[in-house]
Image (tube, coloured by chain):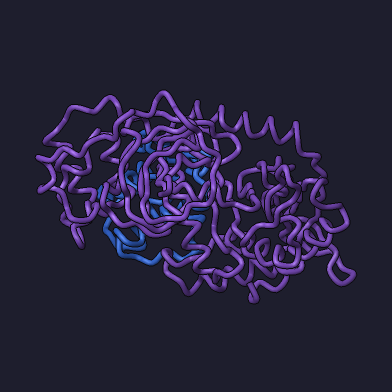
Amino acid sequence: MGEFLMPSLGADMEAGTLVEWLKRPGDRVKRGDIVAVVETQKGAIEVDIFEEGVIERWLVEPGTTVPVGTPLALIAGTQFPPTAKISEVAAVPAAPMPVPPTKVEQLPARPARISPAARRLAAERGILLDRLSGSGPEGAILYADVERAAAAEPVPCPTVPKRLDLAEMRRAIAAAMARSKREIPHYYLSTTVDLTRSFAWIEAANATRPPAQRLLFAALLLKAVADALGEAPEFNGFFTAGGFQPGAGIHIGAAIAIRGGGLVAPAIRDADKLSLDDLMAQLRDLVARARSGALRSSELSDPTITVTNLGERSVETVFGVIYPPQVALVGFGMPVERPWAVAGKIAARRVITATLAADHRASDGHRGALFLADIDHRLQSPETL
Amino acid sequence: MTRDDVAAVLIDELGRIAPETDASRLDPNAELRDELDIDSMDFLNLVTALADRLMIDIPETDYPSLATVGRAVDYLVRKMGVAA
């Protein structure tokens, strides 16, 4: 018997609120299945499961706030890795929440598929998903289905929390960054990278593509960092009580600003193995979901390093604060045109300032310098990214 | 599709990107990126949506023509061959 726990979505998270179950007792689940939606400081997060098994019963009712690590459901037929047990939590009801038997026949055999936009609308309007019948492929619930239900059921449900609480997010950032500055001995390196070749390459690539398939410069930067990390494993992973643990893959947290304030850095998993087009598609999807508050739990807990990209309309240099327990942050400022010496002559070139903030417990400046120089080197051959 | 229709599509799409602002009250001469705090991903999404809805091509080299509401409407109308 295994337990499905309230996940920790970063060093700053202490508790989460169960918003919705997407699987019910008796359902077979496998690794990667989304089992529940949890409300956190980072918005409503879809929680995926890491093991296989059958949901035995629910232990926590929707609307309940419980500490990280609290068992949310029992899973039969699994061998979960041993976890720190949190025995009795006041918020956990003594008895599992029964499934109302009268409703069972109305329910789809499998939990409904639903688009993030539809889920968001449903949460905003307080529409219960198990009352909806979807008109999409395989019964998927579409935005229009929720709109119809919302029109028929205009009273908002007061127990559904707001999807993005910016004040909560601010508190979460405060906790994580205070811990970072308290515990992590940062060192900083900076270098200026000539982007002329990269810009020329991306402009040529985009000239023949429709907008939906165009690349953003940010995708090139993320890919260069991911590839360089392959040669610099001491910047990719976590610093814990046992010392530095290298990451199992290169999962880059892409810092995404939220309108109205705050930011979140969900993972692009195995970014070194993705093609530029796939990486761009994932970035596009992540930005949209981060801003609408529809990220998955693993996307928030997975990053092994963070990359922040200030972009246009900003400033030249960013000095990063590492997100614990990660050990490095790579920052890019605004690309600018500057006089630059090329083959003994001054020319106007587009350049960017790349910085590294790294944990001195895990690496030294010499290795950091090689890592940053390797990122520069890779950006001079964009066609190989 | 008239010029007003084109402007309505643009305002609608800007509203999706920046739901907290009333895009219809934007100064037609204000820089969109500053006024609506649009980043490069927002802008790419805007271009993608406009190209789809208006069935035109918007090459990257034309992006400066979309800098303000006023210039963007002029540009889109010209691209679509709509009589002003």
Residue A233's x, y, as percent?
73, 61
Residue A35's x, y, as percent?
35, 49
* Residue at the spot 54% in from the left edge and 47% down from the top edge: A82
Relative depth, front residue between A204 and A179: A179
Relative depth, front residue between A190 and A118: A118
**Relative side of A353 to A174, left or right:** right
Q: Colour of chain A?
A: purple
* Residue at the spot 20% in from the left edge and 62% down from the top edge: A138
Residue A355 higher or lower than B28, as above or below: below
Question: Which quadrant holds the C terminus of chain A?
Answer: bottom right
* Residue at the spot 65% in from the left edge and 76% down from the top edge: A384
**Relative side of A350 to A33, left or right:** right
Residue B12 higher or lower than A157, as above or below: below
Relative depth, front residue between A383 and B49: A383
Evaluate whether residue B49 shows in this view.
no
Tally the numbered discs: 0
Residue A154 higher or lower than A362, as above or below: above
Residue A117's x, y, as percent?
31, 47
**Relative side of A16 to A381, left or right:** left
Q: Colour of chain B?
A: blue
Q: Where, by quadrant of the figure, is residue A275 drawn?
A: bottom right
Evaluate whether residue A242 shows in this view.
yes
Residue A207's x, y, as percent?
50, 71
* Residue at the spot 40% in from the left edge and 42% down from the top edge: A292
